[in-house]
Image: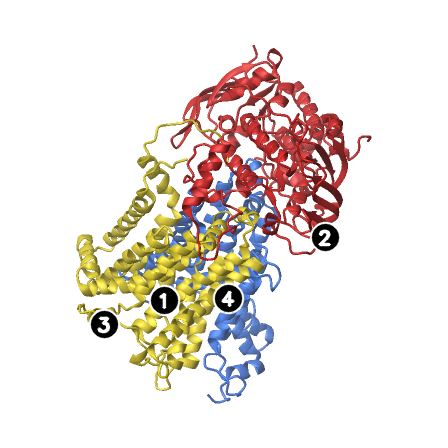
Amino acid sequence: MNNNLPWWFHTLALPAVNILLALTACAVVLLVIDVNIVEAARIMFIGALGNQEGIGYTLFYATNFMFTGLAVALAWHAGLFNIGAEGQATLGGLGVAMICATFGDSLPFGLLVILTTLSAAFFGALWAFIPGWLNAYRGSHIVISTIMFNFIASSLLVFLLVNVFRQPDQMAAVSQTFGEQTWLPYLDQLFKFVGGEISRTPLNISFLWAVFCCFLVHYYLFHTRFGYETRGIGFNHRAGAFAGIDKSRVIIVTMALAGALAGFVGLNEIQGSSHQLKVEFVAGYGFAGIAVALIGRNHPLGIIAASILFGALYQGGSELAFNIDRIGNDIVLLIQGLVILFCGALEWMVKPKLIALFSGSPKQPVGDSRG
Amino acid sequence: MLVPALELKDVSKSFDTNEALVSASLSVAPGSIHGVIGENGAGKSTLMQIAYGLEQPDSGVILIDAVRVNLDCPQTAINYGIGMLHQKVSWLDQHTILENIVLGDNIHSYFYQSSIQSEQNLLQLIREYGFSFDLGTKMADLSYGQRQQVDILRALHRGVRVLILDEPMALLSPIESGHLLALFSLLKTQGIAVVIVSHKLIALHQICDIISVVRHGRVSNNIAPKDITLMQLTKLVVGREVIIPHPSQPLNVKRGQRLLRINQLNVQFHRGGKRSKNSIKLSNIDFSVDSGQVVVMVGLPNAGQDELLDIIAGVIAFDSGYLVIGDRRIDSGARYSISDARRNGVSYVPNPMHELGLVSEFSMAESALLGYQNIKRSFFSGFSRQHNFEYCLNLMTQWDIRPAKPDMKSGFFSGGNQQKMVIAREVSRRPTLLLLNQPTHSIDVGGVELIYQHLFELRQQGAAILVASNDLDEVISLADRVIVMHQGEVCAQLSKDQLSKEILGKLMLNGAINE
Amino acid sequence: MAALNNPLVTAVDNFEQWILLLDSTIRIATPLLFAALAGMLSERSGIIDIGLEGKMLVSAFAGAAWAAHSGSPWQAVLVAMAAAMSLSMLHAFACITHKGDQIISGVAINMLALAITAMLGQRLIYQGVLTDDLRLMPLAFPELLPHDDTIVSLIYWQLLSGHNALVYFAFVTVLLLVVFFKFSPLGKRLSAAGENPLALNRSGVSVELTRYLSVLAGGALCGLAGAYLSLGHGAGFVDNMTVGKGFIALAALIFGQWRPVGVMLSCLLFGFLDALSIRMQGIEFFDSGYIIPVQLIEMLPYVLTVLVLAGFIGSSSAPKALGVHDKF
């Protein structure tokens, strides 16, 4: 019906309007709890982007969002709703921790990084492969099984922490701190190497890996026949079947790849920043990936931008919670929820009106509207 | 002049920025059969949706018995005595006819309602109109035609006075249409108006008392068919003269090269679960198609044609017997997929094309590659977007697919252009065996002309073409040979000179010429 | 960890321990049952409801807040229902009116519920424990049966009586829903909307309206689940007090095959597993030196649901049009 919209409509205008709506609703909530919203906005902005440290944290969070956003978006292109990035990231972290705990002292760093990367990918992929397989061959609903796998993953993590990883002298359910030789280089170390200087934040080289993954997924989806087949199945699996595309294979491969991407959260969180396995290290990044994918229009390059935006919101929100005691970290969750609501669930409330606004096309007779 | 049972006056409607109806008017007299005809996209469906309360007009008024009404939803329209039979009938298959009909009864209490009164009313209607089914029968056990009759029964049960039928003949054999016609004349005597919406000129020309032509969102003429020839009517609908080509000239290719052989093929499918009585069986299918031949399969819906095409194309498996395609023999249980079929020179145009042949979110350039995405592409070569674009543009020029924008999403093209693209894609691969299911279903006359030309050209080059069609006019203009299917069996094979609609109709319905 | 006070060993010997276990099973199963029946109403009409968790949380919060404010626990129950129904309304508005994605809408509702209750919770005065007169108190009818040592009396006093009214109402609801789906015109339409909306549309009934009704009714039941948590089972609202109960309810809904009685049985099973895992914290298994890992018991409902969903246990019979946007 409408193909005469400017190119920036879907990529910029629509997400921007959605975010504005979400922020407005958020401002209303802040007003209700009696917070000065101008002051709040200033704290968030300065906190996220006002100084090197803020930017460092913003990009650190953005790294996680890129991985989980990709995990949701890639599956979306195959017509699958991957709500299980949370559990897949948990398993990925487990994979990283196992390698660090076992080979941390014995292997050279280069080899260790390769191993942890593979292990994060493998365990993340495993946690998505099973629901994928169950969907392809047993007809299980992918959303429900990935939700269930999130809970199974978190129980499994607690079980392993309590029974396997816990240090004898520790009360809390955390693993040992892995030796410094296993740590991923921080980005300021890299900068020092080339002669620059920035302040120390948890930002580490997995950020670069995340950006690279976005480009990799972009190439995969839009420039290879696997990507073509994936999208074909995702948009219209019946036509895909008549085109000779193996739907089961597409589902399983795509889910496994999505899980592997989510698993990389473990690299950033565990090998890059906290250097130990904790109970809730995934902290909702998997669910946030849904919001990121929505704002990024499920496009791998859009996800880079959306992740940085969410990184900034996350970091700004933490600053806000730190500075104003009426606000907790929940503010970030609120914004996420509102973004998902306006951008996803209520997509068709806003979109037609915007389309009508932006397309000033002349009227032309086109008939039968039968579905 | 009688007061019109239903009248739409100066109705306009646009969707987004497109005008579907421009000040259209329609007046239906009680006790008449009123045809509404137009090409796809002319606006006839929108007009009917407004009359049934599914869409609200932007401007204009609706009058029932000269009283202005506001049809805000189908329920209101039903209460005013408007009934609609949709092209796609849908029922709760596991429930009885009675349960299905009372589901929509006006309810006084959400929590308890007796259906005894409805049942008595229905029994009386069944007697009055001579329907041949029992209220306790499960929906799943009825044939397509019977399901349509239940639809009419339901409309009568609700006191219908204007019955709108959307493409009622599209899926019916001439004989079942015959039953329908008898029913229409019975309805007429009761003063019930029947509105038939269709793009089938010939049928409407025969049965209607009056015809309205919808073109570009305007209702232009009210014509009595007896005052006008079919040719003139065609010109009114399409806007120009149309000649459907017939393959009159003898073929240059030497016959006898067997491109498809089906030998004693058997298969059984279960629809709606294993326990369902409603299973389709193909038994002892045995025929062949040679190069330079167009063979057309006809049969009632669900006689097994769709499944047979799917089997030949490798979409579904079969139980016993074998196929020979080119020089490759395929036994039951052999690994044979649609990709294998394509490698063997088989192309398949499934039905419905816009759902099974295209991905509407893909650009047309991407859709034009569907099914051939693996050909001549090495592992890392990726896609040459430039190559796909040019390939698609080429097809668009050859087949007059408009607008010629390969970057536009497939779904944005009109239905007819989507269908042409699917056929164009498959024909352009120069298959040795081309399978088509309902190639011109819901395509308008101009498009049909072009498709036939291309098919005959392919046949001239020595391809074998196997078509499934329910359109007897199409069967007669396309076929070198006709295979009639009846309840999963081939009941007759007819050569071109044996064809007539009467014979085909009898064979389709009964499986034999003599009852 | 001596064998002396090993409750499992004693439990096997001691009938009373079993009764107590079943008693806490019922207490734990009640909110699950309300929420799962709420999900059933919505999903039988074709609308996926993964926002059960969020709706429970919001209604638990609203109920507690209103009880503290008004002093009437029964008013508070109504407010809790209204709170959950307003989220249901949002879900219906997004999914039915605007044909939005049902799962995305559910995710959003869960996130919003968690965030808003936490943010508003910090601002409200009632903080902390509700006194008894603000809660739904246990019902007991001592005149029915004397309190003595017989088994019947034990069962009556420990298991059957002494619950609040919502517990009994939950089980009555199951019965009502069985009748509703089997005999009422609305129940049949509701099932038709989930099985074959096109057929319902063809019979002239508004699929949208039918679905709105069922989603809202689901909201009301979900509100009871939340009210039970903060007014009955617990004493007041705690941040994220549902801790995944909404998802367990979802699991029970699937495990119970979208049927009232099946849903009730699976809620009781999952409630039992939960009650068991609470009693088994750090307990050795028959003196063998093995500690039964509580997390593995906690995992069971989810694992069982995955197995049911995959058709390894029974056959999964989801409504056919569940989550499908219909075109007419």
Marks 1 and 2 close (CB-CB < 8 Å): no
Give the letter of the chain under mark 1. Answer: A
Instruction: Identify which residue is drawn at 61% across, 36% down.
Output: B89
Q: How many marks?
A: 4
Chain painted red: B
Instruction: Identify which residue is drawn at 72% across, 33% down.
Output: B481
Vertical order, A43 against B168 (above or below): below
Q: Which mark is residue A198?
A: none
Question: Label 1: which residue?
Answer: A265
Same chain check for tags 3 and 4: no
Measured in 3D between alpha carbons, the distance from the residue under mark 4 to the one under mark 2, in whole angstroms, is: 40 Å
Mark 3 / mark 1, whichever is N-terminal:
3
Instruction: Identify which residue is drawn at 56% across, 38% down.
Output: B427
> Residue B178 location, x and y as percent?
70, 26
Measured in 3D between alpha carbons, the distance from the residue under mark 4 to the one under mark 1, in whole angstroms, is: 24 Å
Residue B251, quarter of the rendered image: top right
Question: Label 4: which residue?
Answer: C302
Chain painted blue: C
Which amino acid, mark 4? Tyr
Q: Which mark is residue B319?
A: 2
> Residue A240 location, x and y as percent?
53, 49
Marks 3 and 1 close (CB-CB < 8 Å): no
Same chain check for tags 1 and 2: no
Question: Label 3: which residue?
Answer: A189
